[in-house]
Amino acid sequence: MRLSLFLLSGSIVLASAAPVFAHHGWGGNVDEVTAMTGMVTEGVKLAGPHGTMRIKTTDGKVWDITLAPPFRTSSAGLKQDTIPLGAMVTVHGQRNRDPNRYEMKTIQVEYAGRHYTVYPEFADKVR
Amino acid sequence: MGWLEGSALGHLMRDNGVWFYGIVNLTHILGVATLFGAVVILDLRLLGMWADVPLAGISRPTQRMAAAGFCVAAVSGAGLLATKATDYIGNPFFYIKIPAIGLALLNVALVHFTPAWRAHRLRELSVHERRQLAAMGGTSLLFWLTSIGAGRLIGYW
């Protein structure tokens, strides 16, 4: 009796957590893939759960560029020293659902004629 | 936060390859699991489950495992935070998590100063004393669950 009660409460907790798991990843970003060009103000960092970078677009907005997890970003050829500060890059990805948050989950970074596709499985969404 | 990010710990976290953060993250989860696994058993015992098992037999191993788990979680957690500490500014879940940990630790201190807890290895506790410890056990569960829940949700803000 007690055991079944315990299992029941456990499954309730898990069930209520399920939408949260589903949200992690791309749920907080729009479906549409867009491109934008800007100047790198903070270089690629391969630390933390995802690689990151900051770019400034021509309208003066500073965007947080979220890349793939460090290993995958690095495997795509994008290392911490690949793109110098001040370089112009074009990023393809899905921007945050919140229009006031300048954050993009990035599929591909274009720099100096090279394409770094950090999420190859979503490459077909680019253009 | 800027100071923490620029600290030696922050550099250690960022400059050690693409798997370092992930391994520290794993360590943090193991610490939290050890802490909460022990806490849930002790707190449920205080709340009246397994009343046939002597409290003194449960309190010793669970306290030690909880303390060990907390140390592992705290050290690894400081590292995770230091990686990009300024990112956590304005994250409401972070502002819930840290005070909840503080309150949970305060509750631990209160339990240890309670005469009922001090006496539980020496004699049978009265009904009043058991109720008092049960309330503290419930409080403990609430605070730890709040801190773990908020901690898990930090990444979803």
Image (spheres, coloured by chain):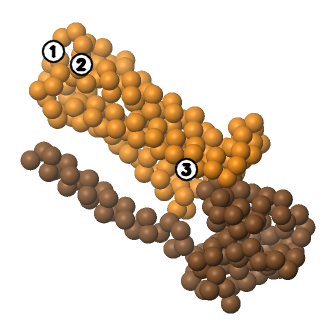
Name the residue located 45 percent from the left edge and 33 percent from the top edge. Answer: B69
Provide the letter of the chain coloured orange: B
Tell me the quarter of the image containing the C terminus of chain A. Answer: bottom right
Q: Are marks 2 and 1 in contact (CB under 8 Å)?
A: no
- Left or right, A63 with respect to A87, comes to left
Q: Residue A18 at what x, y percent from top left?
A: 37, 65
In the figure, the shade used to draw chain A is brown
Q: Name the amino acid type tagged 3.
A: Phe
The structure residue drawn at horizontal position 26% and vertical position 59%, both measured from the top left corner, is A12
Chain bearing tag 2 is B
**Mark 2 Cα within 10 Å, few/some/many (few <14, many 20+)?**
some
- Judge whether residue A60 can be spotted in this image: no
Numbered mark located on residue B56 in the image: 2
Which amino acid, by three-letter code, is at mark 2?
Answer: Ala
| Sequence order check, earlier mark of 2 and 3 | 2
Q: Which of the chains bears the disc numbered 3?
A: B
Alpha carbon of mark 1 to alpha carbon of mark 3: how far?
Answer: 41 Å
The Cα–Cα distance between marks 2 and 1, rounded to whole angstroms, is: 10 Å
Could you confirm whether marks 1 and 3 are on the same chain? yes
Sequence order check, earlier mark of 1 and 3: 3
Provide the residue designation for mark 1: B124
Q: What residue is at 15 percent from the left and 19 percent from the top?
A: B126
Label 3 Cα crowd, 10 Å radius (few <14 / some 14-19 / many 20+) = many
Q: Quadrant of residue B11?
A: top right
Residue at the bottom extreme? A127
Indicate the amino acid at tag 1.
Glu
Q: Is residue A77 above or below residue B4?
A: below
Instruction: Determine the secondary structure under disc 1.
Output: loop
Given residues B52 and B124, the one toward you in this image is B52
N-term-proximal mark, 2 vs 1: 2
Looking at this view, is B93 or A21 the one in front? A21
| Residue position marked by numbered label 3 in the rendering | B94
